[in-house]
Image: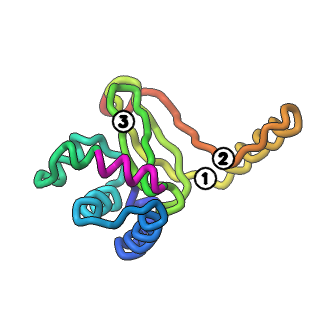
Amino acid sequence: MSGSIADPSVEQVRATVADRLRAVGQRLTANRESLLDTLTASPRPLTIPEILDDRPGLAQSSVYRNLVVLEEAGVVHRVLGADEFARWELAEDLTGHHHHLICASCGRVEDVPASAGLERSVAAAAAAITRTTGFRTQHHRLDLVGVCATCS
C-alpha cells in the first residue's frame, strides 16, 4: 500500500506480519518478505501482474498462494477495481486509514488520505444508521468510482 500515506518502516511491518503469521500457524518466508517489500513500497494497491513485474523471480502460483495466506493472517487485503483484476495492499492497521479512487475505464486504483472532515461526516452517518437500524459499524471503506485523469 501507499508509502505516501503512512510510510511504515519495513522492519515494523515485518515484525507485525511475523507475529500475525505465527498466530495462524505460518511463518514469514523469503517469498512473503518479498511480497511485503513490494506492497510496502507501492503508492497504491497492486494487481498480481504488477507484483510479478516488480518481483520477476517469484512464481505466479507462489504469489497467489502467499497472498491468500497473508490475507487470512490479516496482513493484506483485496481491493476490487472496475476491471477484472483484484488489487492487493497492506492492511490499514499497518499503513494508516485511507480511501480509494477507482477508475471505471481502466480499473486503476489509487489511494487517497482520509481527511478529518470526511471522517467526521462518515462517523455521523454511521451513528445515524445505528440509531435507525441498530447496525453497529466496525469500520468503513470509501471507494470513489469515476474516470482517472489519464482516461478522461
Q: Nearer the viewer, residue 64 or 10?
A: 64
At a point 26% along the width and 42% down the height, the residue shown is 48
Mark 3 or mark 2, which is nearer to you?
A: 3
Quarter of the image for residue 8 reads bottom left
Q: Which residue is mark 3?
A: 86
Residues at circles 2 and 1 in contact by the CB criterion of under 8 Å: yes
Q: Which mark is residue 118?
A: 2
Q: Is residue 86 above or below residue 117?
A: above
Rendered-image quadrant of the N terminus? bottom left
Q: Earlier in the sequence, mark 3 or mark 2?
A: 3
Res. 41 mark: none
Residue under pointer 1:
115
State which region is magenta: 65-73
For image coordinates 32% across by 66% down, the residue present is 28
Residue nearest the viewer, comparing 50 with 33: 33
Quote the CA–CA distance across marks 2 and 1.
Answer: 5 Å
Residue 90 placement: quadrant: bottom left
- Residue type at mark 3 is Ala
Q: CA distance from mark 3 to mark 2?
A: 26 Å
Image quarter where the C terminus lies is: top left
